Amino acid sequence: MSVGASLAGMEVVGGVDSDSAAVATFGKAFPKAASLHRDLLACSPTSILKGAKIAKGDVDILLGGPPCQPYSINNHQRGTHDARCGLVKSYLGFVSYLRPRWIIMENVPGFASIEEGRFLAQLLKSLRNRGYKTSFSILRAVRFGVPQRRRRLIVVATREPTSLDKLIDRLNGVDESLVTLEEAIGDLPEDVSQGSRYKTCPTSAFQEAMRIGSDDVLKNHVCSGLGEINLQRIRHIPPGGNWRDIPRDLLPEGMKRARLGDHTTRYGRLQYSEPSFTLLTKCDPHWGCFLHPSRDRVLTVREAARIQSIPDKIEFPQKLADSYRLIGNAVPPLLAKGILMRVKTVMH
């Protein structure tokens, strides 16, 4: 979201997270901003902000994305019993202290259905009690130029005299040209190494945008390795295919019992002619569609970042698990930019 704000011409004042890898990555990307490594379940917003010397009036727009796992329909134990749900209350603490003009909160669509909608309703009521008008919508990232079929719930609130309904209508009306995987990663080499160089000059507007500010040497163009059994499996999968293309004797035992209509993205291979499916926090073929279209491997960190519309100049940790987690958890910057550009047009 911070990268999206920067792309929208905004100054990023600071960021806070309990994930040390996230804070380190943020600090490299925004050296002039406050990079705060804090656990919001253990520290009060007031103490954090006072320590960072960020006061009321310093922040026009408060961006936030509480962890999505408690609300995701992919989590069979999802629910408000998860301690991380308390981070929404922490977010409200930042609202009370900073009194920003605008509030943008992001989460998975399942946020709207948890507790049959009561949890979201309570959040909106809490914001209204603080003097904010509120609205929310589920947006499709692909309509904002992101090469990924990703849906996200956005909560918008403001203290300004403007129509949020009109703003939401404008956000839902956005329809950028569809960006395919070829347009997203076609200039990246199929072979992987930390010191790779671009395969070609940019061949799409998306590639040109992703390469702004980067040098000729690609950062993080590396990926997780696969064991021999997985390599045997994925050699049978064509672009657009999945686990159903694997010979039965090579399938994991649990998947031999699966119905053909189940788990349609497991062991999925992406297609150059289409956007990607939703990225998760692990590029593991057993959990989703993360196989390269033409090579027998999973996506590299840089390819995954491109699919999230994260520019090449953003450098991720050396530890692959950290990099994939940060990318999978991220809000696509082009989605954040699209939202914030439209907010700018109605700010007073």
Image: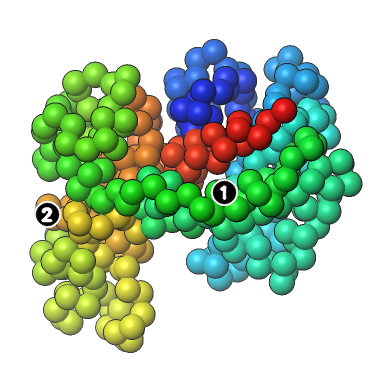
Can you tell which of label 2 and label 1 is closer to the viewer? 1
Residue nearest the viewer, comparing 216 with 136: 136
**For the point 60% across and 68% down, which residue is it?**
77
In the image, residue 217 sits, relative to residue 4, either above or below, namely above
CA separation in Å, label 2 and label 1: 38 Å
Is any atom of residue 268 visible in this view?
Answer: yes
Q: Position of residue 198 (x, y in %)?
A: 15, 30
- Mark linked to residue 313: none
**For the point 33% across and 45% down, which residue is it?**
307
Instruction: Identify which amino acid the numbered label 1 is placed on.
Output: Arg
Residue that numbered label 2 is attached to:
294
Query: Which colour scheme appears in the figure?
Result: rainbow
In the image, residue 205 sits, relative to residue 33, either above or below, namely below
Instruction: Identify which amino acid the numbered label 2 is placed on.
Output: Ser
Residue that numbered label 1 is attached to:
170
Q: Position of residue 288 (x, y in %)?
A: 34, 62
Displayed quadrant of residue 131: top right
Q: Position of residue 170 (x, y in %)?
A: 57, 48
In the image, residue 133 sits, relative to residue 229, either above or below, namely above
Displayed quadrant of residue 244: bottom left
